[in-house]
Amino acid sequence: MAATSARTLKLLSIFGIGMTLTAEELATRLGASVRTVRRDIDTLRELGYEIEAVRGVGGGYRLGRATRLPPVVFDEDQAVAAAVALQTVPAVLSGIRENSARALATLHQAMPARSRVHAEAFTVSAARNYWEFPAAPIDAEIVRVIGGAIRRQYVLRVVHTGGHEPATLVLEPHSLVVWAARWYLVAFEPAADRWRAMRIDHLEPGPPTGRNFDRRQVPHGDPVAFVTSTHDRGDTPADWPCRGSALLALPAHVVTRFAPGGSTVEHHTDSSCRLTLGAWSWAGIAGLLLTFDADITDIEPAELRQALSSLRTRIDEGLGRPV
C-alpha cells in the first residue's frame, strides 16, 4: 500500500509539470507497467483529480486545467532538486540569499516527511573553483524584470551600457541563458533586423512597454547554442593577475564555444580569431591556448611568449629530446 501511494504521488507530481505524456512514457518514468499506470490514473480520478485522455498524434494523458494540486507535491528526486537549487542560486543571483533560505525552510515545512528527509540530507555550500572563471552574481531584480517581459511577450526597452557609450535599444526578448555563471539575454532587435546575445549585467531595463510581439524562431533553434556560438555577446576579459592574447587558426564561432568564461573572442578572418584571456599565471594562459590544438601567432605580451617557450623546453626535456 505504501509503495502504491508513493508511486501515485510521483505520478501526480509528473502531471504537475503540465506535459501530455503517453502511458508508455509514464510507465518508463515510474518504472512500472502500463497497466499499473492506468490503474494509478484511475486512483487519481477517484480522488477527484481531473486526468484528461488526449487522443490523436501527440496524445496521452495530462492534468485538467481546472485541477488544483495540493500546495506542495514533491517526490524524493524533486525534493533533492529543490533543496540543491535553492542553496546554490546565490552563486549566480545577488540579493536573493535570504529569500532562498526562507523559501527552503518553507518547503521543508510543507513537504511530506519522507520527501523532507531526502531534501534535508543535502546541505550544499557553493565555492569558487578558479577553472570556472565565474562572473559576479547578477542582480535578481534585473532577472525578474527581463524574465517577466519574456513570459508576457512584451517588447523590452533597455539602456545598453556595454558599448563605448550607453544606447537605448528596443528588443523582443526571447530567452535567458546562464553560461559560466554569466546571464545572457537572447533577443531580436527589430531596428537592426538582427538577433543578439547580450550580457544582462550590461542592461538597464526601462518601464514595461505593454506592447506584445510575436515569437520568432531563435537561430540554431536553441538559445543555448546561439549564445555559445556568438562571439560578440558583450563579454569582457576577467580581472586576472595575468592577461594575454593570440591569433588562433580557428573560426570565431568555434573558439567561442570552448573559450573559458571571462575571455573574449574577436573575429579576424573566416578561419581565424583573436582570443584574449586571463589566468593566475602566464603558464596558465599558455596552457589554455594549447588546449585549442591550433596554430597560434601574434602572441602578446612578451611574458606570454616566454611562458610558451618555457613550456616547450619542459616538454622537450620530458620527451628526452635535446634542448
Image (tube, rainbow, N blue to C red):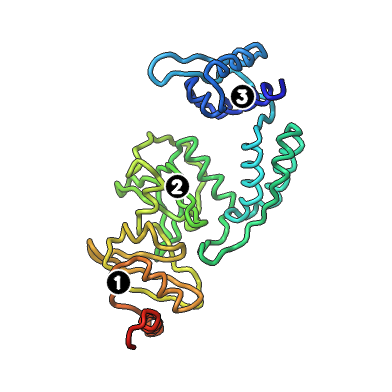
Q: Quadrant of the C terminus?
A: bottom left
Rendered image quadrant of residue 121: top right
Q: Mark 2 is on which residue type? A: Arg
The answer to which of marks 1 and 2 sits earlier in the sequence is 2
**Percent coordinates x, y for residue 315 in the rendering:** 38, 79
Q: Could you say which is closer to the camera, residue 259 or residue 189?
A: 259
Q: Residue at x 56, y 28 (%)?
A: 31
Q: Residues within 10 Å of mark 2 (few under 14, many from 20)?
A: many
The answer to which of marks 1 and 3 sits earlier in the sequence is 3
Question: In this figure, which residue is indicated by the disc labeled 3?
Answer: 12
Q: Mark 1 is on which residue type? A: Leu
Rendered image quadrant of residue 68: top right
**Percent coordinates x, y for residue 278 in the rendering:** 45, 72
> Which element carries disc 3, helix, strand or loop?
helix
Label 3 – label 2 distance at C-alpha: 40 Å
**Percent coordinates x, y for residue 23 in the rendering:** 50, 20
> Which element carries disc 1, helix, strand or loop?
strand
Q: Closer to the camera: disc 1 or disc 2?
A: 1
**Percent coordinates x, y for residue 78 in the rendering:** 62, 37
Q: Mark 3 is on which residue type? A: Leu
Question: In this figure, which residue is indicated by the disc labeled 2?
Answer: 157
Rendered image quadrant of residue 83: top right
Question: In this figure, which residue is indicated by the disc labeled 1?
Answer: 247
Q: Residue furthest left?
A: 270
> Which element carries disc 2, helix, strand or loop?
strand
Label 1 – label 3 distance at C-alpha: 55 Å
